[in-house]
Image (cartoon, grey):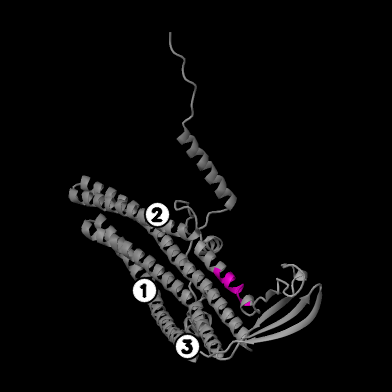
Amino acid sequence: MKPDRPAFVPRRPRLLALLLGLFSVSALAVDGPLPGASVESLLEVAHNRNPDFAAASHEAQAAAERIYPAGSLPDPTLRTELRDITNQGTDSPPGLLPSRTGSTKYTLIQPLPFWGKRDLKRGMAEAEARQASGRASQSWNELAADIKTLYAQYYVLAETGKLTRELLDLAGRLEKISRVRYASGLVPQQDVIRAQLEQTAMRSELVAIGNERHHAVVKLNALLNRPAMAPLAEPLALRPLPPQARLDYSALEARLRLHNPQLFEAEERVVAATKNRALVQRNRYPDFNLGISPIQVGNKINEWELMVEINIPLQQESRRAQEREAQSVLSAAESRRESTQNQLLAGLAENLSAFEAAREVESLTRDNFLPQAELSFKSALAGYENGKVDFTALLDAQRQIRKARLDLLKAQADEQTRLAEMERLLGEDL
Protein backbone atom coordinates (compact mmCIF):
# COMPACT_ATOMS: atom_id res chain seq x y z
CA MET A 1 0.00 0.00 0.00
CA LYS A 2 1.45 3.37 -1.02
CA PRO A 3 1.79 6.01 1.67
CA ASP A 4 -0.38 9.09 1.40
CA ARG A 5 1.17 11.98 -0.45
CA PRO A 6 1.95 14.91 1.82
CA ALA A 7 -0.13 17.99 1.45
CA PHE A 8 1.32 20.72 -0.72
CA VAL A 9 3.47 23.17 1.24
CA PRO A 10 4.38 26.40 -0.55
CA ARG A 11 8.03 27.34 -0.74
CA ARG A 12 8.19 30.13 1.75
CA PRO A 13 11.34 31.84 0.51
CA ARG A 14 9.92 32.15 -3.01
CA LEU A 15 6.55 33.25 -1.71
CA LEU A 16 8.18 35.84 0.53
CA ALA A 17 10.32 37.15 -2.34
CA LEU A 18 7.21 37.42 -4.52
CA LEU A 19 5.34 39.37 -1.84
CA LEU A 20 8.29 41.67 -1.27
CA GLY A 21 8.56 42.29 -5.00
CA LEU A 22 4.88 43.13 -5.24
CA PHE A 23 5.22 45.43 -2.25
CA SER A 24 8.18 47.21 -3.81
CA VAL A 25 6.30 47.72 -7.07
CA SER A 26 3.27 49.05 -5.26
CA ALA A 27 5.46 51.35 -3.17
CA LEU A 28 7.07 52.75 -6.30
CA ALA A 29 3.67 53.25 -7.83
CA VAL A 30 2.57 55.21 -4.77
CA ASP A 31 5.71 57.34 -4.72
CA GLY A 32 5.20 58.33 -8.34
CA PRO A 33 7.83 58.39 -11.10
CA LEU A 34 11.37 57.35 -10.28
CA PRO A 35 13.81 60.14 -9.48
CA GLY A 36 16.95 60.45 -11.54
CA ALA A 37 15.75 61.79 -14.88
CA SER A 38 16.97 65.24 -13.83
CA VAL A 39 19.06 66.60 -11.01
CA GLU A 40 16.05 68.60 -9.79
CA SER A 41 14.11 65.40 -9.09
CA LEU A 42 16.99 64.11 -6.97
CA LEU A 43 17.31 67.37 -5.04
CA GLU A 44 13.59 67.37 -4.25
CA VAL A 45 13.73 63.88 -2.78
CA ALA A 46 16.91 64.65 -0.82
CA HIS A 47 15.39 67.82 0.65
CA ASN A 48 12.51 65.78 2.06
CA ARG A 49 14.34 62.61 3.07
CA ASN A 50 18.03 63.13 3.78
CA PRO A 51 18.58 62.45 7.51
CA ASP A 52 21.69 64.63 7.87
CA PHE A 53 19.88 67.68 6.53
CA ALA A 54 16.84 66.85 8.68
CA ALA A 55 19.07 66.62 11.76
CA ALA A 56 20.69 69.99 11.00
CA SER A 57 17.25 71.55 10.50
CA HIS A 58 16.00 70.18 13.82
CA GLU A 59 19.12 71.46 15.56
CA ALA A 60 18.51 74.92 14.09
CA GLN A 61 14.92 74.83 15.32
CA ALA A 62 16.08 73.72 18.78
CA ALA A 63 18.59 76.59 18.91
CA ALA A 64 15.87 79.07 17.96
CA GLU A 65 13.76 77.85 20.89
CA ARG A 66 16.57 78.79 23.30
CA ILE A 67 16.29 82.50 22.55
CA TYR A 68 13.27 83.32 24.75
CA PRO A 69 14.46 81.37 27.82
CA ALA A 70 17.90 82.98 27.58
CA GLY A 71 16.44 86.46 28.12
CA SER A 72 13.85 85.51 30.72
CA LEU A 73 14.03 86.13 34.44
CA PRO A 74 14.99 83.15 36.60
CA ASP A 75 12.16 81.43 38.42
CA PRO A 76 11.33 82.90 41.83
CA THR A 77 11.89 80.97 45.03
CA LEU A 78 9.37 80.50 47.85
CA ARG A 79 10.79 79.90 51.32
CA THR A 80 8.76 79.07 54.43
CA GLU A 81 10.19 79.40 57.97
CA LEU A 82 8.35 77.96 60.98
CA ARG A 83 9.47 79.94 64.04
CA ASP A 84 9.26 78.77 67.66
CA ILE A 85 7.74 75.38 66.85
CA THR A 86 7.99 74.47 70.59
CA ASN A 87 5.83 77.44 71.60
CA GLN A 88 8.30 78.39 74.31
CA GLY A 89 6.74 80.30 77.23
CA THR A 90 3.16 79.33 76.37
CA ASP A 91 0.84 76.54 77.36
CA SER A 92 0.43 75.41 73.73
CA PRO A 93 2.07 72.11 72.73
CA PRO A 94 4.73 71.98 70.00
CA GLY A 95 3.30 72.03 66.46
CA LEU A 96 4.31 72.09 62.81
CA LEU A 97 1.23 73.79 61.40
CA PRO A 98 1.66 77.52 60.65
CA SER A 99 -1.28 78.42 62.89
CA ARG A 100 0.15 76.42 65.86
CA THR A 101 3.68 77.81 65.94
CA GLY A 102 5.00 81.01 67.36
CA SER A 103 5.08 82.61 63.88
CA THR A 104 5.53 81.64 60.26
CA LYS A 105 7.52 83.64 57.72
CA TYR A 106 6.86 83.25 53.98
CA THR A 107 9.54 84.70 51.71
CA LEU A 108 9.15 85.07 47.93
CA ILE A 109 12.54 85.74 46.34
CA GLN A 110 13.02 86.90 42.74
CA PRO A 111 16.60 86.93 41.33
CA LEU A 112 17.29 90.07 39.26
CA PRO A 113 20.42 90.09 37.07
CA PHE A 114 22.25 93.39 36.71
CA TRP A 115 20.98 95.72 34.04
CA GLY A 116 21.82 94.59 30.50
CA LYS A 117 22.79 90.99 31.28
CA ARG A 118 19.49 89.52 30.09
CA ASP A 119 19.75 91.39 26.79
CA LEU A 120 23.30 90.11 26.30
CA LYS A 121 22.25 86.53 27.03
CA ARG A 122 19.38 86.87 24.58
CA GLY A 123 21.74 88.29 21.97
CA MET A 124 24.13 85.37 22.46
CA ALA A 125 21.26 82.90 22.03
CA GLU A 126 20.13 84.68 18.85
CA ALA A 127 23.66 84.55 17.44
CA GLU A 128 23.94 80.84 18.30
CA ALA A 129 20.56 80.22 16.65
CA ARG A 130 21.78 81.96 13.51
CA GLN A 131 24.92 79.81 13.63
CA ALA A 132 22.73 76.69 13.74
CA SER A 133 20.70 78.04 10.84
CA GLY A 134 23.93 78.61 8.92
CA ARG A 135 25.02 75.05 9.66
CA ALA A 136 21.71 73.76 8.32
CA SER A 137 22.16 75.82 5.15
CA GLN A 138 25.72 74.56 4.83
CA SER A 139 24.50 70.99 5.28
CA TRP A 140 22.07 71.49 2.39
CA ASN A 141 24.75 73.12 0.24
CA GLU A 142 27.09 70.18 0.79
CA LEU A 143 24.31 67.70 0.08
CA ALA A 144 23.16 69.51 -3.06
CA ALA A 145 26.74 69.77 -4.38
CA ASP A 146 27.29 66.04 -3.82
CA ILE A 147 24.06 65.19 -5.63
CA LYS A 148 24.85 67.49 -8.55
CA THR A 149 28.32 65.98 -8.90
CA LEU A 150 27.07 62.39 -8.63
CA TYR A 151 24.28 63.08 -11.12
CA ALA A 152 26.86 64.37 -13.62
CA GLN A 153 28.85 61.15 -13.13
CA TYR A 154 25.66 59.10 -13.47
CA TYR A 155 24.81 60.89 -16.73
CA VAL A 156 28.34 60.53 -18.13
CA LEU A 157 28.40 56.81 -17.33
CA ALA A 158 25.04 56.33 -19.05
CA GLU A 159 26.25 58.20 -22.12
CA THR A 160 29.57 56.36 -22.08
CA GLY A 161 27.68 53.07 -22.07
CA LYS A 162 25.61 54.18 -25.07
CA LEU A 163 28.76 55.33 -26.90
CA THR A 164 30.56 52.06 -26.20
CA ARG A 165 27.61 50.04 -27.49
CA GLU A 166 27.50 52.15 -30.65
CA LEU A 167 31.21 51.62 -31.23
CA LEU A 168 30.76 47.92 -30.50
CA ASP A 169 28.22 47.76 -33.32
CA LEU A 170 30.65 49.67 -35.51
CA ALA A 171 33.43 47.22 -34.65
CA GLY A 172 31.07 44.41 -35.61
CA ARG A 173 30.57 45.99 -39.02
CA LEU A 174 34.31 46.40 -39.42
CA GLU A 175 34.72 42.70 -38.66
CA LYS A 176 32.24 41.85 -41.41
CA ILE A 177 34.15 44.04 -43.87
CA SER A 178 37.43 42.43 -42.91
CA ARG A 179 35.90 38.95 -43.26
CA VAL A 180 34.71 39.75 -46.79
CA ARG A 181 38.11 41.10 -47.76
CA TYR A 182 39.85 38.15 -46.10
CA ALA A 183 37.62 35.72 -48.01
CA SER A 184 38.67 37.51 -51.21
CA GLY A 185 42.33 37.20 -50.26
CA LEU A 186 42.80 40.95 -50.03
CA VAL A 187 43.77 41.16 -46.35
CA PRO A 188 45.37 38.76 -43.88
CA GLN A 189 43.39 36.85 -41.25
CA GLN A 190 44.97 39.02 -38.62
CA ASP A 191 42.57 41.87 -39.53
CA VAL A 192 39.58 39.69 -38.60
CA ILE A 193 41.19 38.67 -35.33
CA ARG A 194 42.02 42.26 -34.40
CA ALA A 195 38.43 43.30 -35.06
CA GLN A 196 37.27 40.54 -32.74
CA LEU A 197 39.79 41.59 -30.08
CA GLU A 198 38.51 45.14 -30.31
CA GLN A 199 34.95 43.95 -29.65
CA THR A 200 36.05 41.86 -26.70
CA ALA A 201 37.82 44.84 -25.17
CA MET A 202 34.69 46.96 -25.57
CA ARG A 203 32.54 44.31 -23.91
CA SER A 204 34.95 44.33 -20.97
CA GLU A 205 34.65 48.11 -20.80
CA LEU A 206 30.87 47.80 -20.74
CA VAL A 207 31.15 45.55 -17.70
CA ALA A 208 33.37 48.11 -15.95
CA ILE A 209 31.00 50.95 -16.90
CA GLY A 210 28.05 48.99 -15.54
CA ASN A 211 29.87 48.46 -12.26
CA GLU A 212 30.73 52.15 -11.93
CA ARG A 213 27.16 53.09 -12.74
CA HIS A 214 25.97 50.72 -10.02
CA HIS A 215 28.25 52.49 -7.54
CA ALA A 216 26.88 55.89 -8.59
CA VAL A 217 23.29 54.68 -8.09
CA VAL A 218 24.14 53.31 -4.64
CA LYS A 219 25.74 56.61 -3.59
CA LEU A 220 22.80 58.63 -4.87
CA ASN A 221 20.32 56.37 -3.07
CA ALA A 222 22.29 56.79 0.15
CA LEU A 223 21.96 60.58 -0.15
CA LEU A 224 18.25 60.24 -0.93
CA ASN A 225 17.68 57.88 2.03
CA ARG A 226 16.43 55.16 -0.30
CA PRO A 227 17.33 51.47 -0.40
CA ALA A 228 20.78 50.95 -1.89
CA MET A 229 19.47 48.84 -4.78
CA ALA A 230 16.42 51.01 -5.52
CA PRO A 231 16.26 51.85 -9.24
CA LEU A 232 16.73 55.33 -10.64
CA ALA A 233 15.34 56.76 -13.86
CA GLU A 234 17.62 57.14 -16.86
CA PRO A 235 19.35 60.55 -16.83
CA LEU A 236 18.04 62.74 -19.62
CA ALA A 237 20.27 65.80 -19.68
CA LEU A 238 22.82 67.76 -17.74
CA ARG A 239 21.96 71.07 -16.14
CA PRO A 240 22.32 74.09 -18.42
CA LEU A 241 25.44 76.13 -17.83
CA PRO A 242 25.17 79.78 -16.74
CA PRO A 243 25.95 82.46 -19.32
CA GLN A 244 29.42 83.92 -19.34
CA ALA A 245 28.14 87.27 -18.10
CA ARG A 246 27.22 85.72 -14.73
CA LEU A 247 30.71 84.36 -14.13
CA ASP A 248 32.52 87.61 -13.39
CA TYR A 249 34.82 86.93 -10.44
CA SER A 250 34.16 90.26 -8.69
CA ALA A 251 30.41 89.69 -8.79
CA LEU A 252 30.83 86.11 -7.60
CA GLU A 253 33.06 87.24 -4.75
CA ALA A 254 30.42 89.73 -3.61
CA ARG A 255 27.75 87.03 -3.72
CA LEU A 256 29.94 84.69 -1.71
CA ARG A 257 30.49 87.27 1.01
CA LEU A 258 26.76 87.88 1.15
CA HIS A 259 25.28 84.38 0.91
CA ASN A 260 27.84 81.76 1.92
CA PRO A 261 26.43 79.99 5.00
CA GLN A 262 29.85 78.94 6.25
CA LEU A 263 31.03 82.54 6.27
CA PHE A 264 27.69 83.58 7.80
CA GLU A 265 28.20 81.06 10.60
CA ALA A 266 31.72 82.36 11.23
CA GLU A 267 30.40 85.92 11.39
CA GLU A 268 27.70 84.95 13.89
CA ARG A 269 30.32 83.17 15.98
CA VAL A 270 32.14 86.50 16.24
CA VAL A 271 28.89 88.22 17.24
CA ALA A 272 28.25 85.61 19.95
CA ALA A 273 31.83 85.93 21.23
CA THR A 274 31.50 89.73 21.32
CA LYS A 275 28.34 89.55 23.41
CA ASN A 276 29.89 86.93 25.66
CA ARG A 277 32.84 89.26 26.32
CA ALA A 278 30.45 92.08 27.20
CA LEU A 279 28.52 89.75 29.51
CA VAL A 280 31.68 88.62 31.28
CA GLN A 281 32.74 92.24 31.74
CA ARG A 282 29.34 93.05 33.20
CA ASN A 283 29.87 90.37 35.82
CA ARG A 284 31.97 92.99 37.61
CA TYR A 285 28.67 94.40 38.82
CA PRO A 286 26.45 92.65 41.37
CA ASP A 287 23.23 90.76 40.81
CA PHE A 288 20.23 91.20 43.09
CA ASN A 289 17.69 89.10 44.88
CA LEU A 290 14.48 90.92 45.77
CA GLY A 291 12.26 89.32 48.41
CA ILE A 292 8.99 90.06 50.16
CA SER A 293 7.96 88.25 53.35
CA PRO A 294 4.55 88.18 55.09
CA ILE A 295 4.74 86.92 58.72
CA GLN A 296 1.87 84.88 60.08
CA VAL A 297 1.03 84.70 63.80
CA GLY A 298 -1.81 82.34 64.52
CA ASN A 299 -4.27 82.74 61.72
CA LYS A 300 -3.39 86.35 60.84
CA ILE A 301 -0.68 88.16 58.88
CA ASN A 302 0.70 90.67 61.34
CA GLU A 303 3.91 91.89 59.62
CA TRP A 304 5.49 92.41 56.18
CA GLU A 305 9.20 92.48 55.41
CA LEU A 306 11.08 93.56 52.30
CA MET A 307 14.47 92.08 51.50
CA VAL A 308 17.16 93.12 49.03
CA GLU A 309 20.16 90.81 48.59
CA ILE A 310 23.28 91.70 46.62
CA ASN A 311 26.13 89.41 45.72
CA ILE A 312 29.50 91.04 46.27
CA PRO A 313 31.93 90.57 43.34
CA LEU A 314 35.08 90.32 45.39
CA GLN A 315 36.94 87.69 43.34
CA GLN A 316 38.28 90.22 40.86
CA GLU A 317 41.30 88.17 39.82
CA SER A 318 39.00 85.31 38.86
CA ARG A 319 36.86 87.70 36.85
CA ARG A 320 39.88 89.18 35.11
CA ALA A 321 40.88 85.66 34.03
CA GLN A 322 37.37 85.10 32.69
CA GLU A 323 37.56 88.39 30.79
CA ARG A 324 40.91 87.41 29.26
CA GLU A 325 39.40 84.08 28.28
CA ALA A 326 36.42 85.81 26.63
CA GLN A 327 38.78 88.12 24.73
CA SER A 328 40.83 85.16 23.51
CA VAL A 329 37.66 83.39 22.36
CA LEU A 330 36.66 86.52 20.44
CA SER A 331 40.11 86.84 18.84
CA ALA A 332 40.00 83.17 17.84
CA ALA A 333 36.55 83.63 16.26
CA GLU A 334 37.77 86.65 14.30
CA SER A 335 40.85 84.75 13.07
CA ARG A 336 38.74 81.78 12.02
CA ARG A 337 36.37 84.09 10.17
CA GLU A 338 39.27 85.58 8.25
CA SER A 339 40.74 82.15 7.51
CA THR A 340 37.36 80.82 6.37
CA GLN A 341 36.89 83.80 4.08
CA ASN A 342 40.34 83.39 2.53
CA GLN A 343 39.81 79.67 1.91
CA LEU A 344 36.38 80.23 0.37
CA LEU A 345 37.63 82.96 -1.96
CA ALA A 346 40.60 80.84 -3.00
CA GLY A 347 38.27 77.92 -3.69
CA LEU A 348 36.01 80.15 -5.75
CA ALA A 349 38.90 81.40 -7.89
CA GLU A 350 40.24 77.89 -8.39
CA ASN A 351 36.90 76.40 -9.41
CA LEU A 352 36.06 79.31 -11.71
CA SER A 353 39.38 78.86 -13.52
CA ALA A 354 38.84 75.10 -13.80
CA PHE A 355 35.29 75.69 -15.08
CA GLU A 356 36.53 78.04 -17.80
CA ALA A 357 39.20 75.52 -18.80
CA ALA A 358 36.65 72.70 -19.03
CA ARG A 359 34.33 74.90 -21.10
CA GLU A 360 37.16 75.70 -23.52
CA VAL A 361 38.09 72.00 -23.79
CA GLU A 362 34.46 71.15 -24.53
CA SER A 363 34.31 73.80 -27.24
CA LEU A 364 37.54 72.64 -28.88
CA THR A 365 36.51 68.99 -28.73
CA ARG A 366 33.04 69.57 -30.15
CA ASP A 367 34.02 72.06 -32.84
CA ASN A 368 37.40 70.70 -33.92
CA PHE A 369 38.55 67.37 -32.51
CA LEU A 370 35.33 65.39 -32.99
CA PRO A 371 34.60 66.53 -36.59
CA GLN A 372 38.22 65.86 -37.55
CA ALA A 373 38.12 62.39 -35.95
CA GLU A 374 34.88 61.52 -37.79
CA LEU A 375 36.33 62.75 -41.09
CA SER A 376 39.51 60.75 -40.47
CA PHE A 377 37.50 57.59 -39.81
CA LYS A 378 35.43 57.98 -42.95
CA SER A 379 38.60 58.48 -44.98
CA ALA A 380 40.29 55.47 -43.35
CA LEU A 381 37.22 53.28 -43.93
CA ALA A 382 37.08 54.21 -47.60
CA GLY A 383 40.81 53.64 -47.94
CA TYR A 384 40.57 50.24 -46.26
CA GLU A 385 37.77 49.12 -48.55
CA ASN A 386 39.91 50.21 -51.54
CA GLY A 387 43.03 48.56 -50.19
CA LYS A 388 44.91 51.83 -49.71
CA VAL A 389 44.88 51.81 -45.87
CA ASP A 390 45.71 48.93 -43.57
CA PHE A 391 43.47 47.77 -40.70
CA THR A 392 45.70 49.35 -38.06
CA ALA A 393 45.03 52.82 -39.42
CA LEU A 394 41.30 52.07 -39.50
CA LEU A 395 41.30 50.98 -35.84
CA ASP A 396 43.28 54.06 -34.86
CA ALA A 397 40.73 56.26 -36.59
CA GLN A 398 37.91 54.50 -34.75
CA ARG A 399 39.71 54.95 -31.42
CA GLN A 400 40.15 58.65 -32.15
CA ILE A 401 36.38 59.00 -32.50
CA ARG A 402 35.88 57.24 -29.19
CA LYS A 403 38.51 59.40 -27.51
CA ALA A 404 36.95 62.59 -28.86
CA ARG A 405 33.50 61.65 -27.59
CA LEU A 406 34.84 60.55 -24.22
CA ASP A 407 36.82 63.79 -23.92
CA LEU A 408 33.64 65.69 -24.65
CA LEU A 409 31.76 63.83 -21.91
CA LYS A 410 34.66 64.30 -19.49
CA ALA A 411 34.73 68.04 -20.15
CA GLN A 412 31.00 68.25 -19.54
CA ALA A 413 31.36 66.32 -16.29
CA ASP A 414 34.17 68.66 -15.20
CA GLU A 415 31.97 71.66 -15.96
CA GLN A 416 29.12 70.26 -13.87
CA THR A 417 31.46 69.38 -10.99
CA ARG A 418 33.03 72.84 -10.93
CA LEU A 419 29.64 74.48 -11.27
CA ALA A 420 28.29 72.48 -8.31
CA GLU A 421 31.33 73.43 -6.25
CA MET A 422 30.95 77.13 -7.07
CA GLU A 423 27.27 76.98 -6.11
CA ARG A 424 28.24 75.33 -2.84
CA LEU A 425 30.63 78.20 -2.15
CA LEU A 426 28.12 80.86 -3.17
CA GLY A 427 25.28 79.34 -1.18
CA GLU A 428 22.88 79.64 -4.11
CA ASP A 429 22.41 78.42 -7.67
CA LEU A 430 23.98 80.17 -10.60
- Left or right of residue 303: residue 287: left
Residue at (47, 70) in percent of width and height: 142
Q: Is residue 74 above or below residue 115?
A: above
Residue 83 % position (x, y): 70, 75
- Left or right of residue 301: residue 371: left
SS for tag 2?
helix
User: Which segment did they paint magenta?
Assistant: 59-67
Residue 347 % position (x, y): 40, 79
Tell me, yes or no, whether the two marked residues, 3 and 1, touch with CB atoms within 8 Å. Answer: no
Tell us which disc is closer to us: 3 or 1: 3
Query: Which residue, given by chain and number where applicable, does mark 2 sit on?
Result: 214
Query: Tag 3: Cα neighbours inside 10 Å, few (<14), some, or many (≥20)?
Result: few
* Magenta stretch: includes residue 65: yes
Question: Which residue type does callout 3 highlight?
Answer: Ser
N-terminal label among 2 and 1:
2
For this orientation, the residue located farthest to the top is 1
N-terminal label among 2 and 3:
2
Query: Which residue, given by chain and number where applicable, does mark 1 sit on?
Result: 361
Foreground of the two, 322 or 223: 322
N-terminal label among 3 and 1:
3
Q: Is residue 174 above or below residue 421?
A: above
Foreground of the two, 293 or 382: 293
Residue at (72, 76) in percent of width and height: 106
SS for tag 1?
helix
Query: Which residue, given by chain and number where applicable, does mark 3 sit on?
Result: 318
